Amino acid sequence: MKVFYSAKNYSGETKAEEIDVENERELASQLRVDGYILTSFKELSEEKKNNTSVKFMDRFFSISLKDKLMFTRNLSVMISSGLPISKSVYNISLQTKNKKFQQILNNIFDDIQAGTTFADGLAHYPNVFGDLFVNMVRVGESSGNLEEILEILSIQLEKEHDLTSKIKGAMTYPAVIIVAMIGIAVLMLTYILPKMMGVFADMKVDLPASTQFIIEMSNMLRAHYIAVAVGLVFFIMAIRFLLTTESGKRILGFILINIPVIKNMVIKVNCARFARIYSSLLRSGVPVVQALTIISNTLTNYYYKKAAKDGIEDVQKGVSLSTVIGKNPKVFPVLMAQMAQVGEETGKTEVVLLKLAEFYEDEVDQISKNMSSIIEPVLMIFIGGAVGFFAISMLQPMYSLMDNIK
């Protein structure tokens, strides 16, 4: 049967994970051999496991990282003040402005009132509370240090929010420029160019290929603007669907870690997330194999997910984390493998990885500040080339006419 247990050794270290065992007595005997004493034992029923599937309507709603951060912070404060979990969740639901999130918290409150654990209540909403959140809360409930676990989670979510904000901030400027450029191009093709077509027709000269190309684009856009708009919507939907497939994720992951301008930021963001999540899980008492499983389900880049998944089997065979990281030099810098090895040799892996995460987060901060100065020249060359192409295409027929007059 599938169970979740927690255990402690004589030095006070906590160990907790999900495993398959015959019964509680067999598990206690296994742990006793390893020097641990079983402190909690919970069978995971098939009904609860099936409840963790994503509901269809939940796919159309999302809860912001900021909402989850505020929920975790407030919950940690209330529990440390002595309030029961159910009462704390209920109080937070009354203060939540997001109606969807409020309904989710009310459902979790009802589950707790009915005898379900807090972690199982969270697990009913995997689209909102992922593996990382649920497993850390489960460990906190089993070991009796939920307040400390929630504090670690709040820091984790805060750093995640900071990283996301920095990336969005760095991408806002080029996104605005590109959207503005597309808008101007559509305006030129649909409004300004048609007024110049009469002049070209009166000239009775052979139009250059570039001019003919722009005129054809203008005619197509004006005559079939509905078809173009629908086609654009379907193209975007097709791209989004492709990115949900294994092949699409692999392609996107490959592109992101190979584009010269942004690959440095992508690698450091993922390394920072990997190091911080792994450190948080180890501090919470989650075993290495389960920690890598959670990381593989939390990271979004295909190659980092694959590195974590491949590392699970290696770690089960006794391979160290530093060796696992060193096997993937394309996605993990040499520094990360070296620091992981230092942590293993000193017995302070979670501390070393936390420092490494902070280092990479500072690097991302610096890169995001310099991103606009890096991208701006590229955008200016691109915009200048587009404007120059249009200007030459429009002026070239006039110069040809003047040559004929001479």
Image (spheres, rainbow, N blue to C red):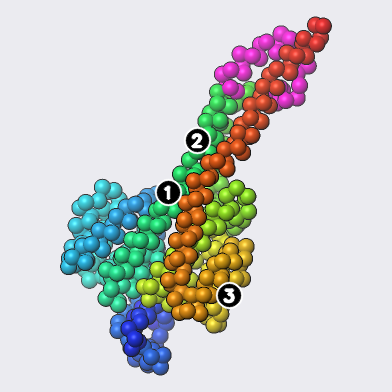
Q: Earlier in the sequence, mark 2 or mark 1?
A: 1
Q: Image check: 381 left or right of 321?
A: right
Closest to the observer, 282 or 91: 282
Please state the extent of the stretch shown in magenta in the rendering: 188-216
Closest to the observer, 159 or 58: 159
Q: Image check: 63 left or right of 366?
A: left
Q: Give the CA distance from mark 2 to mark 1.
A: 16 Å
Question: Disc 2, disc 1: CB below 8 Å?
Answer: no
What amino acid is labelled 1 in the image? Ser
Q: Earlier in the sequence, mark 1 or mark 3?
A: 1
Q: Earlier in the sequence, mark 3 or mark 2?
A: 2
Q: Is residue 390 above or below residue 29?
A: above
Q: Which residue is mark 3?
A: 323
Q: Give the CA distance from mark 3 to mark 2.
A: 43 Å
Residue found 49% across the figure and 53% down from its top:
364
Residue 13 location in percent, x, y?
Answer: 35, 82
What amino acid is labelled 3 in the image? Thr
Q: Is residue 309 visible?
A: no
Residue 315 location in percent, x, y?
Answer: 53, 78
Q: Is residue 384 above or below residue 356?
A: above
Q: Secondary structure at mark 3?
A: helix
Q: Which residue is mark 1?
A: 165
Q: Is residue 192 magenta?
A: yes
Closest to the observer, 234 or 376: 376
Residue found 55% across the figure and 23% down from its top:
187
Q: Is residue 345 above or below residue 193?
A: below
